[in-house]
Image (cartoon, rainbow, N blue to C red):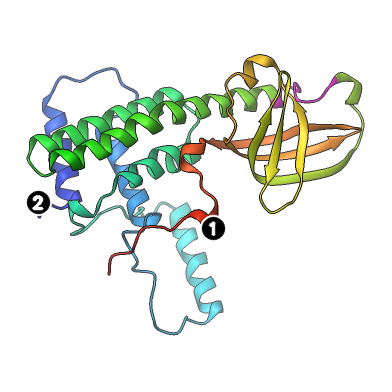
Amino acid sequence: MSPTTVQTAIDDFVRYADTVEKSDAQATPDQCLEMLSQYLVHYSDLFNEMESEEEPADFADWEEGLDNHMSALLEGDVEAVGHLGNLPLEALDPEHMRDFLGWFVLRETSDGELLQAYSDTLRAWVDFILARGWWKHDVYLGFIEVLEEVTPEAVRVARVSRVLFHFIRSGGGVPPRMRGQRFSRFVEGHAQVSTLAENSLQFSFHHQDELIGPVILPAPILGMIEVGDVFDLELGMRGDAWVIVDVGPVYPSCVYVEVEEYQGLDKLS
């Protein structure tokens, strides 16, 4: 395997991209790869600087340090750290691409076109790595397979999130006969679509032993949703009807696994 680092592969690609003809894409390659770096540093299994065998510091000191850091961020005095140091390129796994595009980016945006632009950048980057001889062809194919699987799903659920947001904020989530009634119950969190019917769906919350629903939605919206999709949402019961009170990101089932099923990637020492 090549001794090249991930940071070198990113820097060389960004310089290369600056020499080719620019397109009208929403995102530049450096924007996408900077975000990828943030994910790898702070959310992947590749860095464990924050883990230590030493005794944890006093909670009050830790809390004060966090408050100071957040204040500095708000004042613009601290930039997010995204440099990957000497992380070897061989440490990168196709599942990091799945997690980045199908989870991390979806937390930040529901713009399907931006997600597609990010995917195009990642595809061009892995093509560049192969052309430089830094990956063997079978390794390259693993990354391409994941990108081809997760991209259409990420774009789809981003559109679901955006459409649902506007539908709910316009009052479309509350049946006219129920408007004005008080809510009798709320449920919120990450909920997975368990069943889809002609005009409704049911959700399951994994911390509860019950199905929530049916939740009635217009057919065009239901047509965009698939069983297994995971919604960050709040549901409320008005009368005998469940309605979506608020919705955040939506994630495709291809990035979601049960906690007890997930073995995880081994951390590098």
10 sits to left or right of 200: left
Q: Residue at x 49, y 59 (%)?
A: 71
Say what secondary structure mark 2 lies in: loop
Figure quadrant of residue 36: top left
Q: Is residue 77 visible?
A: no
Q: 150 or 263: nearer the eye?
A: 263
Figure quadrant of residue 115: top left
Residue flagged by tag 2: what amino acid is it? Ser
Residue flagged by tag 1: what amino acid is it? Glu
Q: Position of residue 135 (x, y in %)?
A: 13, 43
Q: Position of residue 67 (x, y in %)?
A: 52, 65
What residue range appears in magenta? 168-175
Name above or below for residue 139 compared with residue 171.
Answer: below
Q: Position of residue 169 (x, y in %)?
A: 70, 26
157 sits to left or right of 234: left
Circle 1 Cα neighbour tier, 10 Å, few/some/many (<14 / 14–19 / ≥20): few
62 sits to left or right of 243: left
Q: 80 or 174: nearer the eye?
A: 174
Name which of mark 2 and mark 1 comes first in the sequence.
2
For disc 1, the marked residue is 260
Is 159 in the magenta? no
- Magenta stretch mostly in which secondary structure? loop
For disc 2, the marked residue is 2
Q: Residue at x 51, y 48 (%)?
A: 257
Q: Is residue 139 visible?
A: yes
Q: Quadrant of the C terminus?
A: bottom left
Distance between the alpha carbons at the discs numbered 2 and 1: 35 Å
Say what secondary structure mark 1 lies in: helix
Is 170 in the magenta? yes
Q: Position of residue 158 (x, y in %)?
A: 51, 29
Q: Residue at x 33, y 68 (%)?
A: 49
